[in-house]
Image (tube, helix red, strand yellow):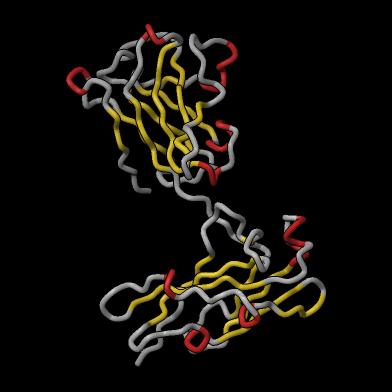
């Protein structure tokens, strides 16, 4: 498992040793995954500290939302901050760990933040602290049980069918819509540059409307090379897609998640 490189925000670089660090295990995680953060306090105000150490952490939020402190952020720390208490290593008293699931720890959905800020501190600020660390959080992955694509491997010249099963839809509003449309585009290359998906989105209309096939299932079939308006030399390398109501106010995957992506096999010449 590779180790991520973290961005450090130095409060006073002349006074901070390069011994301090923070790492995450697993190195790549989403806000809905359990992660263990390890902080090395060597060269900080906590170097050699023997009292209880607590994590002070905040969600660095997306879409212009303000950063959000964890509910456990309180000074001085006491019994109410038990969830933020770090575990000191038995072999190195300057190594501390804490395990948590970010979205639960901050109390906000995973789609609302893509970084976490974190530091270690004593029960009171006067006991010492580390520098701030910023750790990247991977975007949440939406593996839809509602949408299926067939065949699972295909080229741009094959017939592709996308199925949408409303019986498995968890959003009651989306489930009740009754008419569904495919929002879709492509990625790929023209031999010199990567294709911009924004140039290939299909307009919502009769051509993108799914057909009801019974028992709550809808589908749409198409041949990618004919469905999209391709320029000479364009090669489709990826299909991007989601299901929506006609206005786009309701979607699967839900708002905040990335559009679904499927690699398109390039046929040999």
Q: Is residue 66 above or below residue 243?
A: above
**Where's residue 228, x and y in %?**
49, 83
* Residue placed furthest toward the right: 215
Quarter that holds the C terminus:
bottom left
Q: Is residue 182 left or right of residue 139?
A: right
Q: Is residue 210 above or below residue 159?
A: above
Q: What residue lies at 46% left-to-right and 41% top-to-bottom? A: 64
Q: What residue lies at 17% left-to-right and 20% top-to-bottom? A: 14
**Closest to the observer, 4 or 161:** 161
Q: What residue lies at 43% left-to-right and 70% top-to-bottom? A: 197
Q: Quadrant of residue 236?
A: bottom left
**Where's residue 137, x and y in %?**
44, 43
Q: Is residue 268 above or below residue 185?
A: below
**Where's residue 202, x and y in %?**
53, 76
Q: Is residue 156 left or right of residue 216?
A: left
**Where's residue 72, x and y in %?**
55, 21
Q: Quadrant of residue 245?
A: bottom right
Q: Is residue 254 above or below residue 84?
A: below
Q: What residue lies at 49% left-to-right and 38% top-to-bottom? A: 65
**Closest to the observer, 43 or 159:** 159
């Amino acid at each position: 498992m590779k180790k991520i490189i973290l961005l450090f925000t130095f409060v006073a670089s002349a006074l901070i040793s390069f011994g301090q660090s923070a790492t995450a295990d697993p190195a790549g995680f989403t806000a809905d995954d359990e992660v263990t953060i390890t902080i090395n306090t060597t060269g900080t105000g906590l170097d050699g500290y023997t009292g209880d150490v607590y994590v002070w952490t905040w969600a660095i939020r997306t879409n212009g939302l303000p950063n959000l402190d964890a509910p456990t952020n309180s000074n001085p720390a006491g019994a109410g901050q038990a969830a933020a208490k770090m575990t000191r290593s038995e072999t190195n008293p300057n190594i501390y760990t804490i395990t948590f699931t970010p979205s639960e720890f901050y109390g906000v959905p995973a789609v609302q933040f893509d970084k976490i800020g974190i530091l270690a501190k004593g029960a009171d600020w006067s006991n010492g602290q580390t520098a701030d660390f910023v750790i990247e959080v991977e975007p949440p992955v939406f593996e839809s049980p509602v949408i299926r694509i067939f065949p699972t491997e295909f080229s741009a010249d094959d017939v592709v069918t996308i199925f949408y099963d409303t019986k498995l839809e968890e959003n009651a509003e989306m489930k009740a819509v009754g008419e569904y449309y495919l929002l879709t585009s492509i990625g790929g290359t023209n031999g010199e540059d990567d294709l911009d998906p924004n140039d290939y989105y299909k307009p919502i209309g009769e051509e993108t409307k799914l057909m009801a096939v019974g028992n709550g299932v809808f589908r749409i079939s198409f041949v990618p090379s004919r469905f999209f308006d391709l320029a000479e030399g364009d090669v489709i390398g990826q299909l991007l897609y989601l299901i929506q109501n006609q206005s786009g106010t309701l979607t699967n995957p839900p708002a905040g998640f990335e559009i679904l992506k499927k690699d398109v096999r390039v046929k040999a010449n």
